[in-house]
Amino acid sequence: MIQSIIFVILGFVLLVVGGEFLVRSSVALSFRLKLSKMVIGLTVVSFATSAPELLVSLQAALEGSADLSLSNVIGSNIANIGMVLGITALIGPLAIDKDFYKFNWPVMILLSLALYLFVDNDGTLTRMEGGILLLSLLVYLFLLLKRARKHTGTIVEEVDDALAKVSNFKMILWLIIGGSALYFGSELLVSGAKFIAKSAGISEAVIGLTMVAVGTSVPELAASVIAALKQEKAISLGNLIGSNIFNIASVLGVTSLIQPITLSDTRLMEIDIFWMLGFALVLLPLAFIPKKMILGRIKGFFIFAAYCVFIALVFIKQ
């Protein structure tokens, strides 16, 4: 048991390190390919920051742990809103832009509902359904870039200009470090989490919804808290919603294309996916009531408290 806990902690550390190096190398490579800063920020960075979820889900699905794969994405999407957004808003109020309710939020809701219908239909996310999710992502990215070009004021803060001057050797070295850390991190995390679940008599779905989901959301949480403490513009609501869109469309899309995801723990479809939809839906009224287009501390407390209730119920009802 202690060895498994060490594996899980090491896995988390490697995923954080691997994700950071992969983002750096991807951005440096994108500058080499003469991609604009806007394109890099809206697409390349988003893909790279979804890499921990992708590797963990893929590893779990290939090892026959479909519940861990699906619960990781459902849990990560809940954690992105309940934990990351809740804690960030508690530290400092967040401004909400119009793109939230005009574009990003409806796309997240549509993809969340599509995931529910696909899996609820026959208990499996098939290759064809995975292909539809990936195709939806391409349409979303096309429309995202089109809208960003119209609004020339779009500023993408995650992209570091200094990465344009990185040498080829450094870029390749970062890519190797990032890829290796993500691979071994996902191996350790999945094997450790599976053993803990068996030893403690907890289902893999519960481990995926809590421990694994929080672990793969740690990079977003760290970045948001640091930005909020520095009183800089913290991670935007749009970025977190974008992360949720990528988790469903790219992580589950790619995973199910390689290995169809067959559900064995019905609680994911009977309880947890409704929590994911609930957290997504409640953002719209919170954006307008009581103070319009501001996500303040009271709203942050409400969101984070709801996340704590969710985590407590996961363990009580397992």
Image: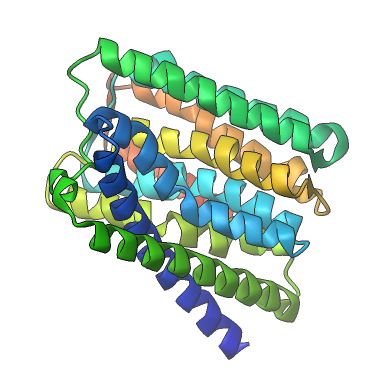
Give the residue displayed 27% in from the left and 53% down from the top. 223
Q: Residue at x 23, y 48 (%)?
A: 91
- Left or right of 290: which side holds 61? right
With 271 as the anchor, is 138 left or right in this view? left
308, 224: nearer the viewer: 224
Name the quarter where the N terminus is drawn: bottom right
Quarter residue 132 falls in:
top right
Residue 215 at x, y percent in the picture: 48, 62
The residue positioned 52% from the left and 45% from the top of the image is 78
Residue 279: x percent and y percent? Answer: 52, 36
Task: Determine the image quadrant of residue 153.
Answer: top left
Where in the figure is residue 117, as x and y percent of width and height?
75, 28
The type of colouring in the image is rainbow
Is residue 95 visible to the viewer in this orientation of the structure? no
Direction from residue 238 to residue 125 in the image, left or right: right
Quadrant holding the C terminus = bottom right
Q: Residue furthest right?
A: 122
